[in-house]
Structures are given as structure tokens and as C-alpha cells.
Amino acid sequence: GIQVEQSPPDLILQEGANSTLRCNFSDSVNNLQWFHQNPWGQLINLFYIPSGTKQNGRLSATTVATERYSLLYISSSQTTDSGVYFCQVDSSYKLIFGSGTRLLVRP
Amino acid sequence: ETGVTQTPRHLVMGMTNKKSLKCEQHLGHNAMYWYKQSAKKPLELMFVYSLEERVENNSVPSRFSPECPNSSHLFLHLHTLQPEDSALYLCASSQDSKTGTYEQYFGPGTRLTVT
């Protein structure tokens, strides 16, 4: 089946810093999403991005489907950005999550 | 209510109990999903329903029994669970297509503890 790898597994930032999170996948996919899981367990949609680039405020994402990776950029990080970031890929109902990047933003 | 709701939010049950988790979506979607999130493991897809028909069942033990009476409601019936079934159970919904899913929206989850 499809393998999804996220890097780095853990990341500590000082408030205001920028970061890039990566999601690699082993086969072609129909869709890709990025989520943020807050400390209470709620998964919050960030981007639905099977290809191309999208931006939403301080966050942006790029998926290069032909090279099987996606990047999530966080600029000017804030303490509220802390949590776990997951990418999820979909290949005809094979919905696979990566193991996540745990981000801690220190004030 | 908006989005995807789940009840109860917390559940403690013994191994001989029978309980049910409920999920309701208010987004007009036609597909619903159950996921399991255990400590230190990636989120695992358990079941997928599209237009109230089960289209995916990822080798889940029979002590978990899903039910989708209509496109807005999804249940997970639990029976004789094991302590290793303790986890966060997440429900999601999306609009469906023949090639897969569109954007998924998740509920807040039910944190289950099996004693």
C-alpha cells in the first residue's frame, strides 16, 4: 500500500520563526490534505491540495504530485500553532495519514 | 449545530459492556468515516460509508460494528472490547466522488477507555 512519511517528526520553534514541514508519499494519489490537531484532539482542516500552491494567511502549502511530495509552510509562527500537523493522502478510498510533525512554538 | 458532532465525548466501559458512539454531520455530505487514533500510532481508517453503503472496511475486528442509517448519521457499536481498543475515535464526512474523496471534515472525537 501507499506509504506516507512526514518530516521532521518533532520541531521546536521560537515565536516568530518560519518553518517547512514535508510529506512524502510513495505512489500517485487523488487527493492530499493537511490538518492541524490541537491539544484537545480536534483535527482542523488547513489545506485540501492535490496539486499546486495555496495560501491562507501565514500558512501556505505546495503539492508536487509528479514528484510525490507536499510542503506546508508556516511563517511568523505563534504559540497557537503548536500541535501536531498531519498530511493525509487518498487513493480510491485508501485514506492514509502520515505519522505527523509535532510542533512546539515557544514564546 | 454545525459541522460534525460526536457523542459522547468521553466514554469509560468495561470489557463486557455494549455501547455505541454517534456521529452526525450537518454539511450535506454523502460520505462518512470512522478513524481510530491510538497513542503513538498514525490515524487508522476503520470504515467508509458512501451514500449509506459501506465501501471500505480495513480489517477491523468484529467487536466494532458500524451502522449508517442515512447520509447524516453514523454509529459505531462496541461490544466486548479489549483494553488495547482504548483510543480516540474520530468521525469525518466529505463529499464523495467515483475517484475518491473530497475534503474531509472531522468531529471532535470520542475518547474511549476500556477497563
Image (cartoon, coloured by chain):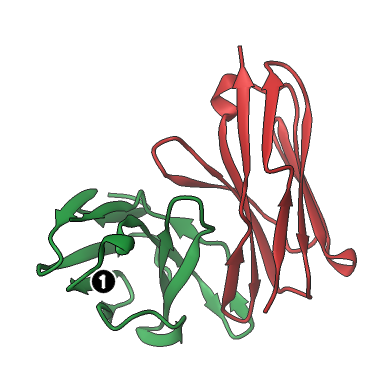
Chain colours: A red, B green
* Residue marked by disc 1: B76
The location of residue B13, given as percent across then percent down, is 14, 58
Displayed quadrant of residue A50 = bottom right
What x and y, as percent, mark residue A83?
A: 54, 35
Q: Secondary structure at mark 1?
A: strand
Neighbor class of circle 1 (other Cα within 10 Å; few <14, some 14-19, many 20+) is many
- Specify the amino acid type for callout 1: Leu
Q: Is residue B22 left or right of residue A13?
A: left
Quarter that holds the C terminus of chain B: bottom left
Asked if residue B44 is positioned above or below residue B88 in the image, the reply reads below
x%, y% of residue B16? 10, 70
Query: Is A57 or A97 nearer to us in this picture?
Result: A97
Q: Nearer the viewer, residue A28 or A57?
A: A28
Residue at left 89%, top 69%?
A66
Give the side of residue B94 with respect to residue B97, left or right.
left
Left/right placement of residue B85 relative to residue A19 reads left
Residue furthest left in the image = B17
Q: Residue at x 26, y 61 (%)?
A: B83
Q: How many marks?
A: 1
